[in-house]
Image (tube, rainbow, N blue to C red):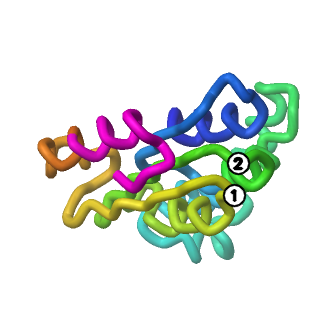
Amino acid sequence: MGAGIALQSAGIDPRIEAVIAEAPFASLREASYDYAGLQKYPLLGKTLFAPGAWVMLLHGRSLAGFPAAEVSPVHAVAARAFPVFLICDSRDTTLPCRHSEKIYVAARGPRWLWVVLDAFHTAALGYQPAEFKRRVLHFFADPSAAP
């Protein structure tokens, strides 16, 4: 959830100049469908198990005090232009690459998407440690240049 929260925060807080986000969710609604679909069958989460996703979002609203279904990093990156470096793990079933891809398409500022082959959820550092370090440091040295 941290990657999505960082993107959401950057959409409204100009003190956040750039964001690196590995395995972010495109929207809480979309992520709830992945979870309801047992993280392997999002179509089930949008159809047969949709009531489970709706209950999860309703419960989130009661806990947070705001409509959890409206939490959307996609809307955040579209609302404010800031550099964003998205890291997608190709074998991630928790938050598949389509989430990062949606954020990438919506982003108004400089943006990069790195798909880490064979990596599972938030495992890019473990699969490609040298390349991970190189890209992250390069991005923070110059967020407007491709890592």
Q: Relative to 36, is 18 above or below? A: above
Q: Residue at x 58, y 42 (%)?
A: 4
Q: Relative to 64, is 116 above or below? A: below
Q: Could you tell me if the residues under marks 1 and 2 are in contact, i.e. CB atoms within 8 Å? A: yes
x and y, in percent, of residue 23 in the image: 44, 50
Question: Alpha-carbon neighbours of circle 1 within 10 Å: few (<14), some, or many (≥20)?
Answer: some
x and y, in percent, of residue 137 in the image: 30, 35
SS type, badge 1? loop
Horizontal arrangement in the rendering, residue 138 relative to residue 4 (left or right): left
Q: Residue at x 60, y 59 (%)?
A: 103
Horizontal arrangement in the rendering, residue 3 relative to residue 70 (left or right): left
For the residue pair 138 and 84, the one nearer the viewer reads as 138
Q: Which residue is mark 1?
A: 108
SS type, badge 2? loop
Q: Work out how far the residue at label 1 is from the one at label 2, CA to CA, in angstroms.
A: 5 Å
Residue 26 seen in the current view? yes
> Residue type at mark 1?
Arg
Q: Relative to 103, is 77 above or below? A: above
Which contiguous range is marked in magenta? 134-147
x and y, in percent, of residue 64 in the image: 78, 26
Q: Is residue 142 on the magenta stretch?
A: yes
Q: Residue at x 28, y 46 (%)?
A: 135
Q: Disc 1 or 2, which lies upstream in sequence?
A: 2
For the residue pair 21 and 136, the one nearer the viewer reads as 136
Question: Alpha-carbon neighbours of circle 2 within 10 Å: few (<14), some, or many (≥20)?
Answer: some
For the residue pair 105 and 146, the one nearer the viewer reads as 146
**Residue 118, quarter of picture:** bottom left
Q: Residue at x 62, y 68 (%)?
A: 105
Q: Which residue is mark 2?
A: 81
